Amino acid sequence: MMTLTRRAIFLDACGVGPLWVRRHIDGTDPTEQPDLRMPDLAQASVATVIAPAPAPALVTAEDSSIVVTALNKTPSPPQPLSVETAPMESNEKNELMSAWEESSLPTSVTSFIRPDLAAAKSPTSRLLPTSPNIIADSDTVLADIAGMDWRQLKAAVSECTRCGLCHSREHTVFGAGDERAKWLFIGEGPGQAEDQDGEPFVGPAGQLLDNMLAAIGVRRGENAYIANIVKCRPIDVEGDAGRDRSPSAEEVAACLPYLQRQIALIQPTVLVALGKTAALSLLALDASTLVASLRGTVHRYAGLPLVVTYHPAYLLRKPADKAKAWSDLCLALTCHAAILE
């Protein structure tokens, strides 16, 4: 009588009987291949409930070869799904792109991404310094200048080296006039005569300015103060033979805090910008702005009325525009009278 092992009894109970054979690759270590055998009840520590399965068909030699081939085959990695999307409409592209346009971002976000572009949108963007030396000391210098009195301010201007104009100057031109004046006239910068004398508006342009002041009942040094946007002479070539030019944005940025402090100390009633450089620097406008477009309107600077007119040097070249300048002075006179009332 044949003695049945526990394994044979289990297989017979599952309906497999002696037809079940082990299917592992010949010549290999069975421990390295997936174990297809049913768990041995003698070694099982946890009872496993197995649903009875229908008896499989007879396993032939051909079936065995198929099984072996399947076990030897290395599974291929899963292929990515191919997802086709419909082409994006043009309006959808525009909406998505507009979300990244700097003009559509809040100021705080723009300044975080690119401080130079955020500054470009601010009212004083064209007056911001670009030189590393100016940027490094701007906060400290601005704080110091804002607390200076007249004596300290004059000393600071005379020793200033914040821009390249200091290398070619003969004298700084601080400004002149009544330090409690109600009228403040602001020009562009010193010329050759001003650089030599250290005084603003000397020579033919200065004489014409004096006549303009007299026309509205004001005299130089009496209730009037004359200053410039920059305190040193801008020239194209270093030396006495250099030709006067308009100051650059960097030079204006370096020097403008001095003028701002002068305005705070004087506390004038009316500001008169003489020429394009003075007007655009004070109003922070683009260089392409024409003086003619700014005339006839009362602008505001630091809460003070600001009137724009032509520079006396320009009027010497274009005498026909003196009538327009007179109209501008009358507008400034009206602002002055209205404030006094």
Image (tube, rainbow, N blue to C red):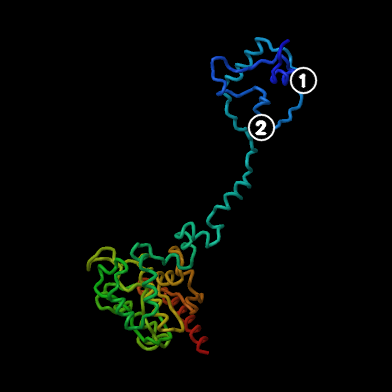
Image location (x, y in percent) of residue 307: 47, 77
Give the CA separation, mark 1 to mark 2: 26 Å
Residue 250 visible in the snapshot: no
Residue name at image x 47 percent, y 79 percent: 327
Instruction: Give the residue number, with chain letter if any, for mark 2.
Output: 45
Q: How many marks?
A: 2
Secondary structure beneath disc 2? loop
Image location (x, y in percent) of residue 44: 66, 29
Would residue 1 be found to the left or right of residue 157 on screen?
right
Mark 1 touches mark 2? (CB < 8 Å): no
Would residue 177 be found to the left or right of residue 21 on screen?
left
Residue name at image x 25 percent, y 68 percent: 168
The amino acid at mark 2 is Ser
Residue ranking furthest to the front:
1
Residue ranking furthest to the left:
240
Instruction: Give the residue number, with chain letter if any, for mark 1.
Output: 54
